Each structure stands twice: as C-alpha cells, then as structure tokens.
Image (cartoon, grey):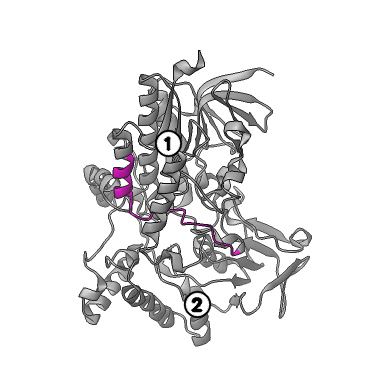
Amino acid sequence: METKQFDAIVVGAGFAGLYMLHKLRGRGLNVRVIEAADGVGGTWYWSRYPGARCDSDSIYYNFTFSEDLYKKWRWPERYSAQPDILRYLNFVADELDLRKDIQFETRVTKASFNDDKKVWEIETDTKEKLEAKYFISGVGCLSTTNIPPFVGVETFKGEKYHTGRWPHEKVDFTGKRVVIIGNGSSGVQAMPLIAEEAKELTLLMRTPHYVAEARNHPLTKEQQDEAMANYEDIRDSFLTTPGGIRMYTTGKPATELTSEDQKKELEYVWKTGGLALGSVFTDVGVNKESNFVVSQFVRDKIDEIVEDEDTAKVLHPDYYITTKRLIIGTNYYEIFNRDNVNLVTLKDNPIVRIVENGIELQNGTIECDAIVFATGYDSMTGSILRMDILGRDGQSLREKWEDGKVVKTYLGLSVQNFPNFFMVTGPQSPSVLTNMPSAIEQHVDWIDRCIEYMEENNIQLIEATEEAEVEWAKQCDDIANQTLFPYTNSWYTGANLDGTKRSGFVIFVGGLNNYRKICDDVADKNYEGFTLDAANVLN
C-alpha cells in the first residue's frame, strides 16, 4: 500500500486541531488532520446531551489570534450551548478553509517513530499508512468516555446513553423512568431538563459536588457589541491572567475581611453567577480556613434551596471547594424539590449489577426504562494512550506512563524518547484549570514557533531530555503541594476511574500566565531542556 507523505499529522479537529492546522499550513507545511467524527468540533461534536454548554463566559470561549475572526462572530448567550459552540467551530473551519486538509471518519490506531528514517509512521482504521516529520496530538483532555465496568451492563433491555457520546437526534424521555449515574458537570447540566420530561428521575450519586449558579441569560445586541469593542482586553486576558479569563476577585485573602464582608462578597458572586467562587478571595485554593468559608457558604445555600433536610445533608460536599472541578448549573439543587426526582447515595447503597429491567443496588432494584451514564472521562491521558504510540526503539508511551499512573513530560508538550511528538494541552500543562481556548492558543503558538525554529535552522529532531522531565514533574508537584489540590481524590488525579491516584500531579497549577513565561523562556534559550539533532545526521 502506498504511504502518503506529510510534513505534519495532527490528531483531532476540535479547537486544538483547527488552530494547529491553520498555523502550520500558514507556514507552508503539508498538514493532514485525522478526525474520528464526520465533522469538526471535537468534544463539542460528541457531547450533545441536554443542557450541554461551556462554563467559561462565551466572549472568552473562542479564538483571539485573529481580531477579524473574533469580530465576525456573535454569541447568543452568556454561556453558550453545545449547538452554538459547534456552529462556531464550523464557522472557523469555513472562514479559514480548513476542511480540505481534514480527513474525517478516521482514527489513528498506531503511530511509530522510525529511528532509521527519522519520521513518524501512522496507521489508521481505514488501513492507510502515513508518514510525517511531526506528529501532534490535539485529542484533548476530556474526550475518551469512561463507563465503569458494571456487571451486566450488556443485559439491560432499555435505552443506554453516555453524555459524552449522545445521539445527534433529540432523545425523548417523556413518561419514562430514567436513572442517571454521576453528578459531575454533564450530569448537573442534564438533570434539570431530563426531570422536566421524565416520569421519574433517579440520581445515583457517588460524591456530592459544589454547584454554583450559572445565571445564564441571552446577550443583548449592546452586550455583544461591547464584547466586540473590548477585543484587546479579551486578548490581553488570554495572555496575562492565571486562567486565561477575567474573573471577579476582591484581590484579597478571605482572612483579611470580616465575616460580614466575606458573606457580602460571596452573596454577590452567587447572585451574579459563574466560577468566581474560586477567585473571589485570593487564598481559596491554598488556605484551609478561607476555603472553609467558601465551602460552608455553598453548603448553607444547599440548605436554603433543598426543602428536605435529609436530602440537603446528603448533597453537602465534604472536600475543599475548587480541588475538584467547580461546576456551574441552572436550578440543579431545585430539582430535588420535585416529586419525580429521587436521590440515592452509592456510598450507602452501592451498585451490585445492572439487570435487564434496571439497576440492582445492595438494598434493592431500581426499575427504569433508560440509563444515562454521566460517568465522565478517562481524563488527561486517556485519549492520548488510546492511540498506540511507540517512540525510539519501539518504546510504548502507555508503558512509559504506566497506563497513565506515572506521567512523564516536559512542559506537558513533549516526551523524552518520542522525538517531534507534541501534545496540545497535554498532561502537566495548565489545561483543564484554565479557559481551554486560552490554553490551546498558547500551546499551538509555542509548537508553531518551535517548528519554525527547526525548519529555519535545519533541525531534524527535537525531544525532551530525561532530566528536564524529572525537573518538570518535581516543579508540578511542588506547586500543587502548596495548594489544597492533593487533599482530594478527583479526575485531576485519575481517581475517578478506579480510586487509584496517579503518582504526581498532572496539571500545572501555577497559572497560565506563569506557564506562558516558562515556555517562552525555554524557547528564548534555544529550547533549553531539549535535545536537537541537525538534519545532516541523515546523510
């Protein structure tokens, strides 16, 4: 079979893949994007569940590299829904004429670095063979769905759905008994809408979470025009803020405010909505006393909203707020006041097996017509490891990372022994603790600059050194250990899968602005921490 030659192969046609294609194609490189879906969008192509929407304000949830592109688009709501985000990414693909270089309905099944030829050899499920100098992952942190290995799941005779792989057509739950497993972001967004249709909705909850009100609303023409006029400020927020987004903050630690002023500020962010519970005080993520103030405020709100006292107590989270993903929703706690909504805590009544007519729990069986798995993703490493990636001497990335339990990277961008392999928002980068488009732009810009340097200086290969990987892992751990993150098991640590935490913290929690400076400094020093091989080694 003929092997097709490219300068770069990019995996994924979401935010990351689209921008990476645009940048490298503008550099004159021959690029092919490989995408499993039949359209662009990445996560926003697949996650079509009821209520799916972004949790960054829409005016920040887009590209800012082009002012012209930015000003051609108008978001209809404060937090845009999945259909609008998917329309936006299709708009970008059309505006930049990207589709001609995207191969849809194709998965990368294997990618091997050929030591002799100094190229990546890529195989697909369409039985094609591709070769490229550069191999770039844009598969994202939250794209490989996770369904726990429940016994008997295949025996269920009703409807089964995962929020991350939702049907393209509307699912009608009218008059049906629905069980939803999981109450992370997708579950919180979906439940209020499903509850309006279903005859009965039962949540099987492992761990209660902190949920802030979104206070979503349509954007008026005046608000849309104001966002367009503030392009420079939006762009600046991508470059200079810890999360790549402007967030309300007092600029002070909670300990510097009186209890009355703390409550006043917290009431303000609750009423205005969004993620500002994590930023309202500067020490929420590092000071247990300040964190308790915010955590208890949310627990008190749950008690105010949920009418049944026992149900309210079950919904109380008992971990440090922000050490798991802070969720924003709309009228989530209110649904537990509905007569057709039930709550089961799996710590008290665990799942035994799934049976043909429902779910057998330790204390009885819940009969249902449909099961919704809102059980999340094999986060951070799952989508990368799903591809069989082999580096020098056939070393498997899965083996190097011990199935994702011991992650080793440099800057979350590169891996020692895997030359010319780059990851956009890979593990050990700021990624999921930021506004994702901000992090993606930073990563793509850095990779593009690196490739420019290689092409202009006749460099054939670049790869991280082992020493740089060790030092970067230590830096990520040292920063995380100054915060409250390590106190909580979460999908940040991989514990959502089987309860086994990863060795080391796989997110750089020092802020996107500081991370940007570190990456730029590495590039300014001619890629310190990397080994570069000149092209003439081939001759």
Residue under pointer 1: 91
Q: Few, some or many C-alpha atoms within 10 Å of disc 2 (few <14, some 14-19, many ≥20)?
A: many
Residue under the image location 40 percent in, 65 percent down = 322
- Please state the total of marks drawn on the protein image: 2
Disc number for residue 524: none
Give left or right: position of 437 versus 380. left
Quadrant holding the N terminus: top right
x%, y% of residue 416? 49, 38
Give left or right: position of 49 versus 126. left
Residue under pointer 2: 315
Element assignment for label 1: helix
Identify the main secondary structure in magenta: loop
- Could you say which is closer to the camera, residue 372 or residue 4? 4
**How far apart in space, not on screen, are marks 1 and 2 (Cα)?**
40 Å
Seen in the picture, residue 351 relative to 17 is either above or below; the reply is below
Seen in the picture, residue 310 relative to 175 is either above or below; the reply is below
Residue under the image location 47 percent in, 48 percent down = 427
Which kind of residue does numbered mark 2 sit on? Answer: Leu
Which kind of residue does numbered mark 1 sit on? Answer: Phe
- Magenta stretch in the rendered image: 499-519
x%, y% of residue 304? 40, 82
On the image, which quarter does residue 69 sit in?
top left
x%, y% of residue 391? 57, 34
Q: Is residue 244 magenta?
A: no
Give left or right: position of 171 versus 284. right
Front label number (1 vs 2): 2
Element assignment for label 2: loop
